[in-house]
Image (cartoon, rainbow, N blue to C red):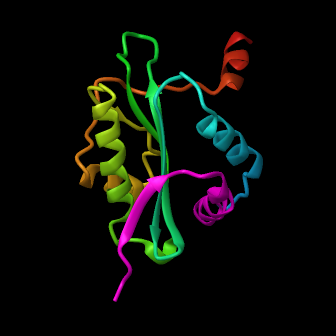
Amino acid sequence: MTPQLAVRNLQRADLPAIARIDKLHTGSAKRAYWEAVFARFLEPGNGPLRIGLCAERGARLAGYLLGEVRAFEFGSEECGWIFAVGVDPRAARTGVASHLLAEACARFRDGGMPCVRTMVRRNDVPVLSFFRGNGFRGGSFVQLELDVREVERRRM
């Protein structure tokens, strides 16, 4: 029998497990990055709503999700942003990320946010499929980028 999934708030002791899961997905250890994220998410304060969630199955951390309220330029209203989600490969395709996302969306809604956004690499089919499968669609903004090395080449 599979132990039930429990979703809870992020705790400092979760840092090694989250860094491990992230490394499994990205291929690189980012301990300093995760330490900075944890410092920001666990510090008390009156800043924007921050959501740091973990899912546990039994005594094992099965996944995590991080998000916060953000507002950007060009008329973007304040909304919830999911900027990190990861699931231990041993718990993949068992609903862990969907449970975390549902809890995050409920907290953003309770915090008065009208919508939730995220950004995904266009070639990351599993992550795109996850978000689309959970109701996400193309939004009203288009992300653009410029290789800054091209600016100098154009001047020549």
- Is 88 left, or right, of 155 in this rendering? left
Queried whether the magenta region covers residue 156, the answer comes back as no
* Residue at position x 71%, y 10% in the image: 155
- Is 83 left, or right, of 129 in this rendering? right
Residue 86 in view (yes/no): no
Quadrant the N terminus occupies = bottom left
Residue 118 in view (yes/no): yes
* Residue at position x 64%, y 41% in the image: 37
Magenta region, residue range: 1-26
Q: Is residue 71 above or below residue 96?
A: above
Q: Is residue 89 above or below residue 99?
A: below
* Residue at position x 77%, y 46% in the image: 32
Residue 154 in the image, given as x and y percentages of width and height: 67, 15
Looking at the image, which residue sits at the far bottom? 1
Report which quarter residue 153 is drawn in: top right
- Is 76 left, or right, of 64 in this rendering? left
- Is 74 left, or right, of 110 in this rendering? right
Residue 18 in the image, given as x and y percentages of width and height: 61, 59
Quadrant the C terminus occupies = top right
Queried whether the magenta region covers residue 6, the answer comes back as yes
Residue 62 in the image, given as x and y percentages of width and height: 49, 68
Report which quarter residue 19 is drawn in: bottom right
Report which quarter residue 6 is drawn in: bottom left
Return the residue nearer the eye: 150 or 107.
Answer: 107
* Residue at position x 36%, y 34% in the image: 117
How many marks are shown on the rendered structure? Answer: 0
Looking at the image, which residue sits at the far left? 135
